[in-house]
């Protein structure tokens, strides 16, 4: 089943070249084998954006890490009594955060590619309780999302959502999210859940705009692919936001 959504339906989309009919149409359809390389590329590029997001933007969200780095600064000064060492410490901290964020996220990508994202048909397309969709714009795949049903509790997990950077804030993410909600309603699931470690406000705005609410935040979440060494604990730390949406009273057009 395909869902077509005009970009003009969403708030303040970025201006883009118009198609011959005056609109660019987002087509959300089921994954096909020919989409595999494009889907994997969009997914991996989206994950790579998490490296600076976690290492840099995430720093101000973790006062415990800032306190630890401040203590490290004082200890270094007491031991060395060198101001240039103190001056270099912030650069060392940022490099450490970037390095370990990169290592963990590459490990997570490796794990995903060796399981579900490496064999999409097997993991998502063979069972009636799971599915993966792509969003296409003028025939080009620009977004991806997956849904996995769980009987206990009776819920659907929204997974692997990623949108090509050039097509964000133009309704693609909303169209993909609505497709998962439609899947949950037609299969009689009671809730849709998702988890994210993103710090970028746009991701959280998207989920809230679809009707999700944050029900739990886990500080110090253990990311799949993490080795959890001492240095990793010092320089890599993320928050996991768990979102939920009750779909029992939702209609197929996404309106309560």
Image: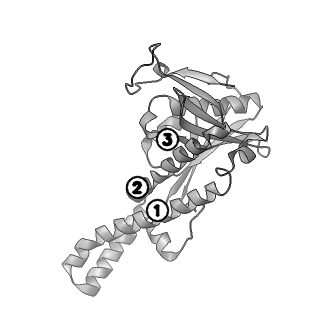
Q: CA distance from mark 3 to mark 2?
A: 17 Å
Instruction: Please state if 91 lies on the left or on the right of 255 as rendered.
Output: left
Mark closer to the chain start, 1 or 2: 2
Q: Quadrant of the N terminus?
A: top right
Q: Nearer the viewer, residue 30 or 94?
A: 30
Residue 156: where, in percent of width, then height? 70, 40
Query: In terms of sequence position, does the residue under pointer 3 or pointer 1 come before the other?
Result: 1
Q: Which residue is mark 1?
A: 101
Q: Of residues 42 and 108, which is closer to you in this image?
A: 42
Disc 3 crowd rating (10 Å Cα; few below 14, some 14-19, many 20+) is some
Residue 116 vs 72, above or below: the answer is above
Residue 139 appears in the picture as rendered = yes
Q: Identify which residue, 177 or 31, lies in the foreground.
A: 31
Q: Are marks 3 and 2 in contact (CB under 8 Å)?
A: no
Please give the residue where the numbered disc 2 appears in the rendered image.
52
Dot 2: element:
helix
Q: Provide the residue designation for mark 3.
A: 204
Residue at the location (45% across, 49% down)? Answer: 199
Q: Residue sitting at 29 percent across and 72 percent down?
A: 89
Q: Is residue 210 visible?
A: no
Mark 1 and mark 2 residues within 8 Å of each other at the beta carbon: yes
**Which image quarter: residue 80?**
bottom left
- Does 25 sit left or right of 117 as displayed? left
Q: Position of residue 136 (x, y in %)?
A: 55, 30
Q: Is residue 50 above or below residue 144?
A: below
Q: Quadrant of the C terminus?
A: top right
């Amino acid at each position: 089943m395909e869902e077509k959504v005009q970009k003009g339906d969403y708030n303040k989309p970025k201006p883009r070249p118009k198609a011959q009919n005056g609109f660019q149409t987002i087509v959300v359809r089921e994954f096909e084998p020919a989409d595999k390389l494009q889907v994997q590329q969009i997914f991996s590029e989206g994950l790579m954006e998490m490296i600076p997001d976690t290492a840099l933007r995430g720093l101000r969200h973790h006062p415990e890490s800032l306190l630890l780095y401040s203590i490290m600064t004082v200890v270094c000064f007491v031991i060395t009594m060198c101001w240039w060492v103190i001056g270099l410490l912030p650069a060392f901290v940022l490099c450490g955060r970037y390095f370990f964020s990169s290592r963990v996220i590459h490990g997570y990508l490796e794990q995903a590619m060796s399981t579900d994202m490496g064999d999409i048909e097997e993991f998502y397309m063979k069972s009636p309780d799971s599915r993966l969709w792509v969003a296409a714009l003028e025939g080009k795949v620009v977004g991806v999302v997956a849904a996995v049903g769980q009987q206990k509790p009776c819920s659907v997990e929204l997974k692997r959502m990623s949108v090509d950077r050039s097509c964000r804030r133009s309704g693609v993410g909303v169209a993909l999210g609505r497709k998962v909600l439609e899947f949950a309603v037609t299969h009689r699931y009671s809730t849709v859940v998702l988890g994210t470690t993103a710090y970028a406000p746009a991701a959280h705005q998207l989920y809230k705009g679809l009707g999700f609410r944050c029900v739990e935040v886990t500080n110090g979440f253990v990311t799949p692919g993490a080795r959890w060494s001492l240095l990793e604990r010092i320089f890599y730390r993320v928050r996991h936001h768990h979102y939920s949406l009750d779909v029992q009273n939702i209609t197929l057009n996404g309106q309560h």
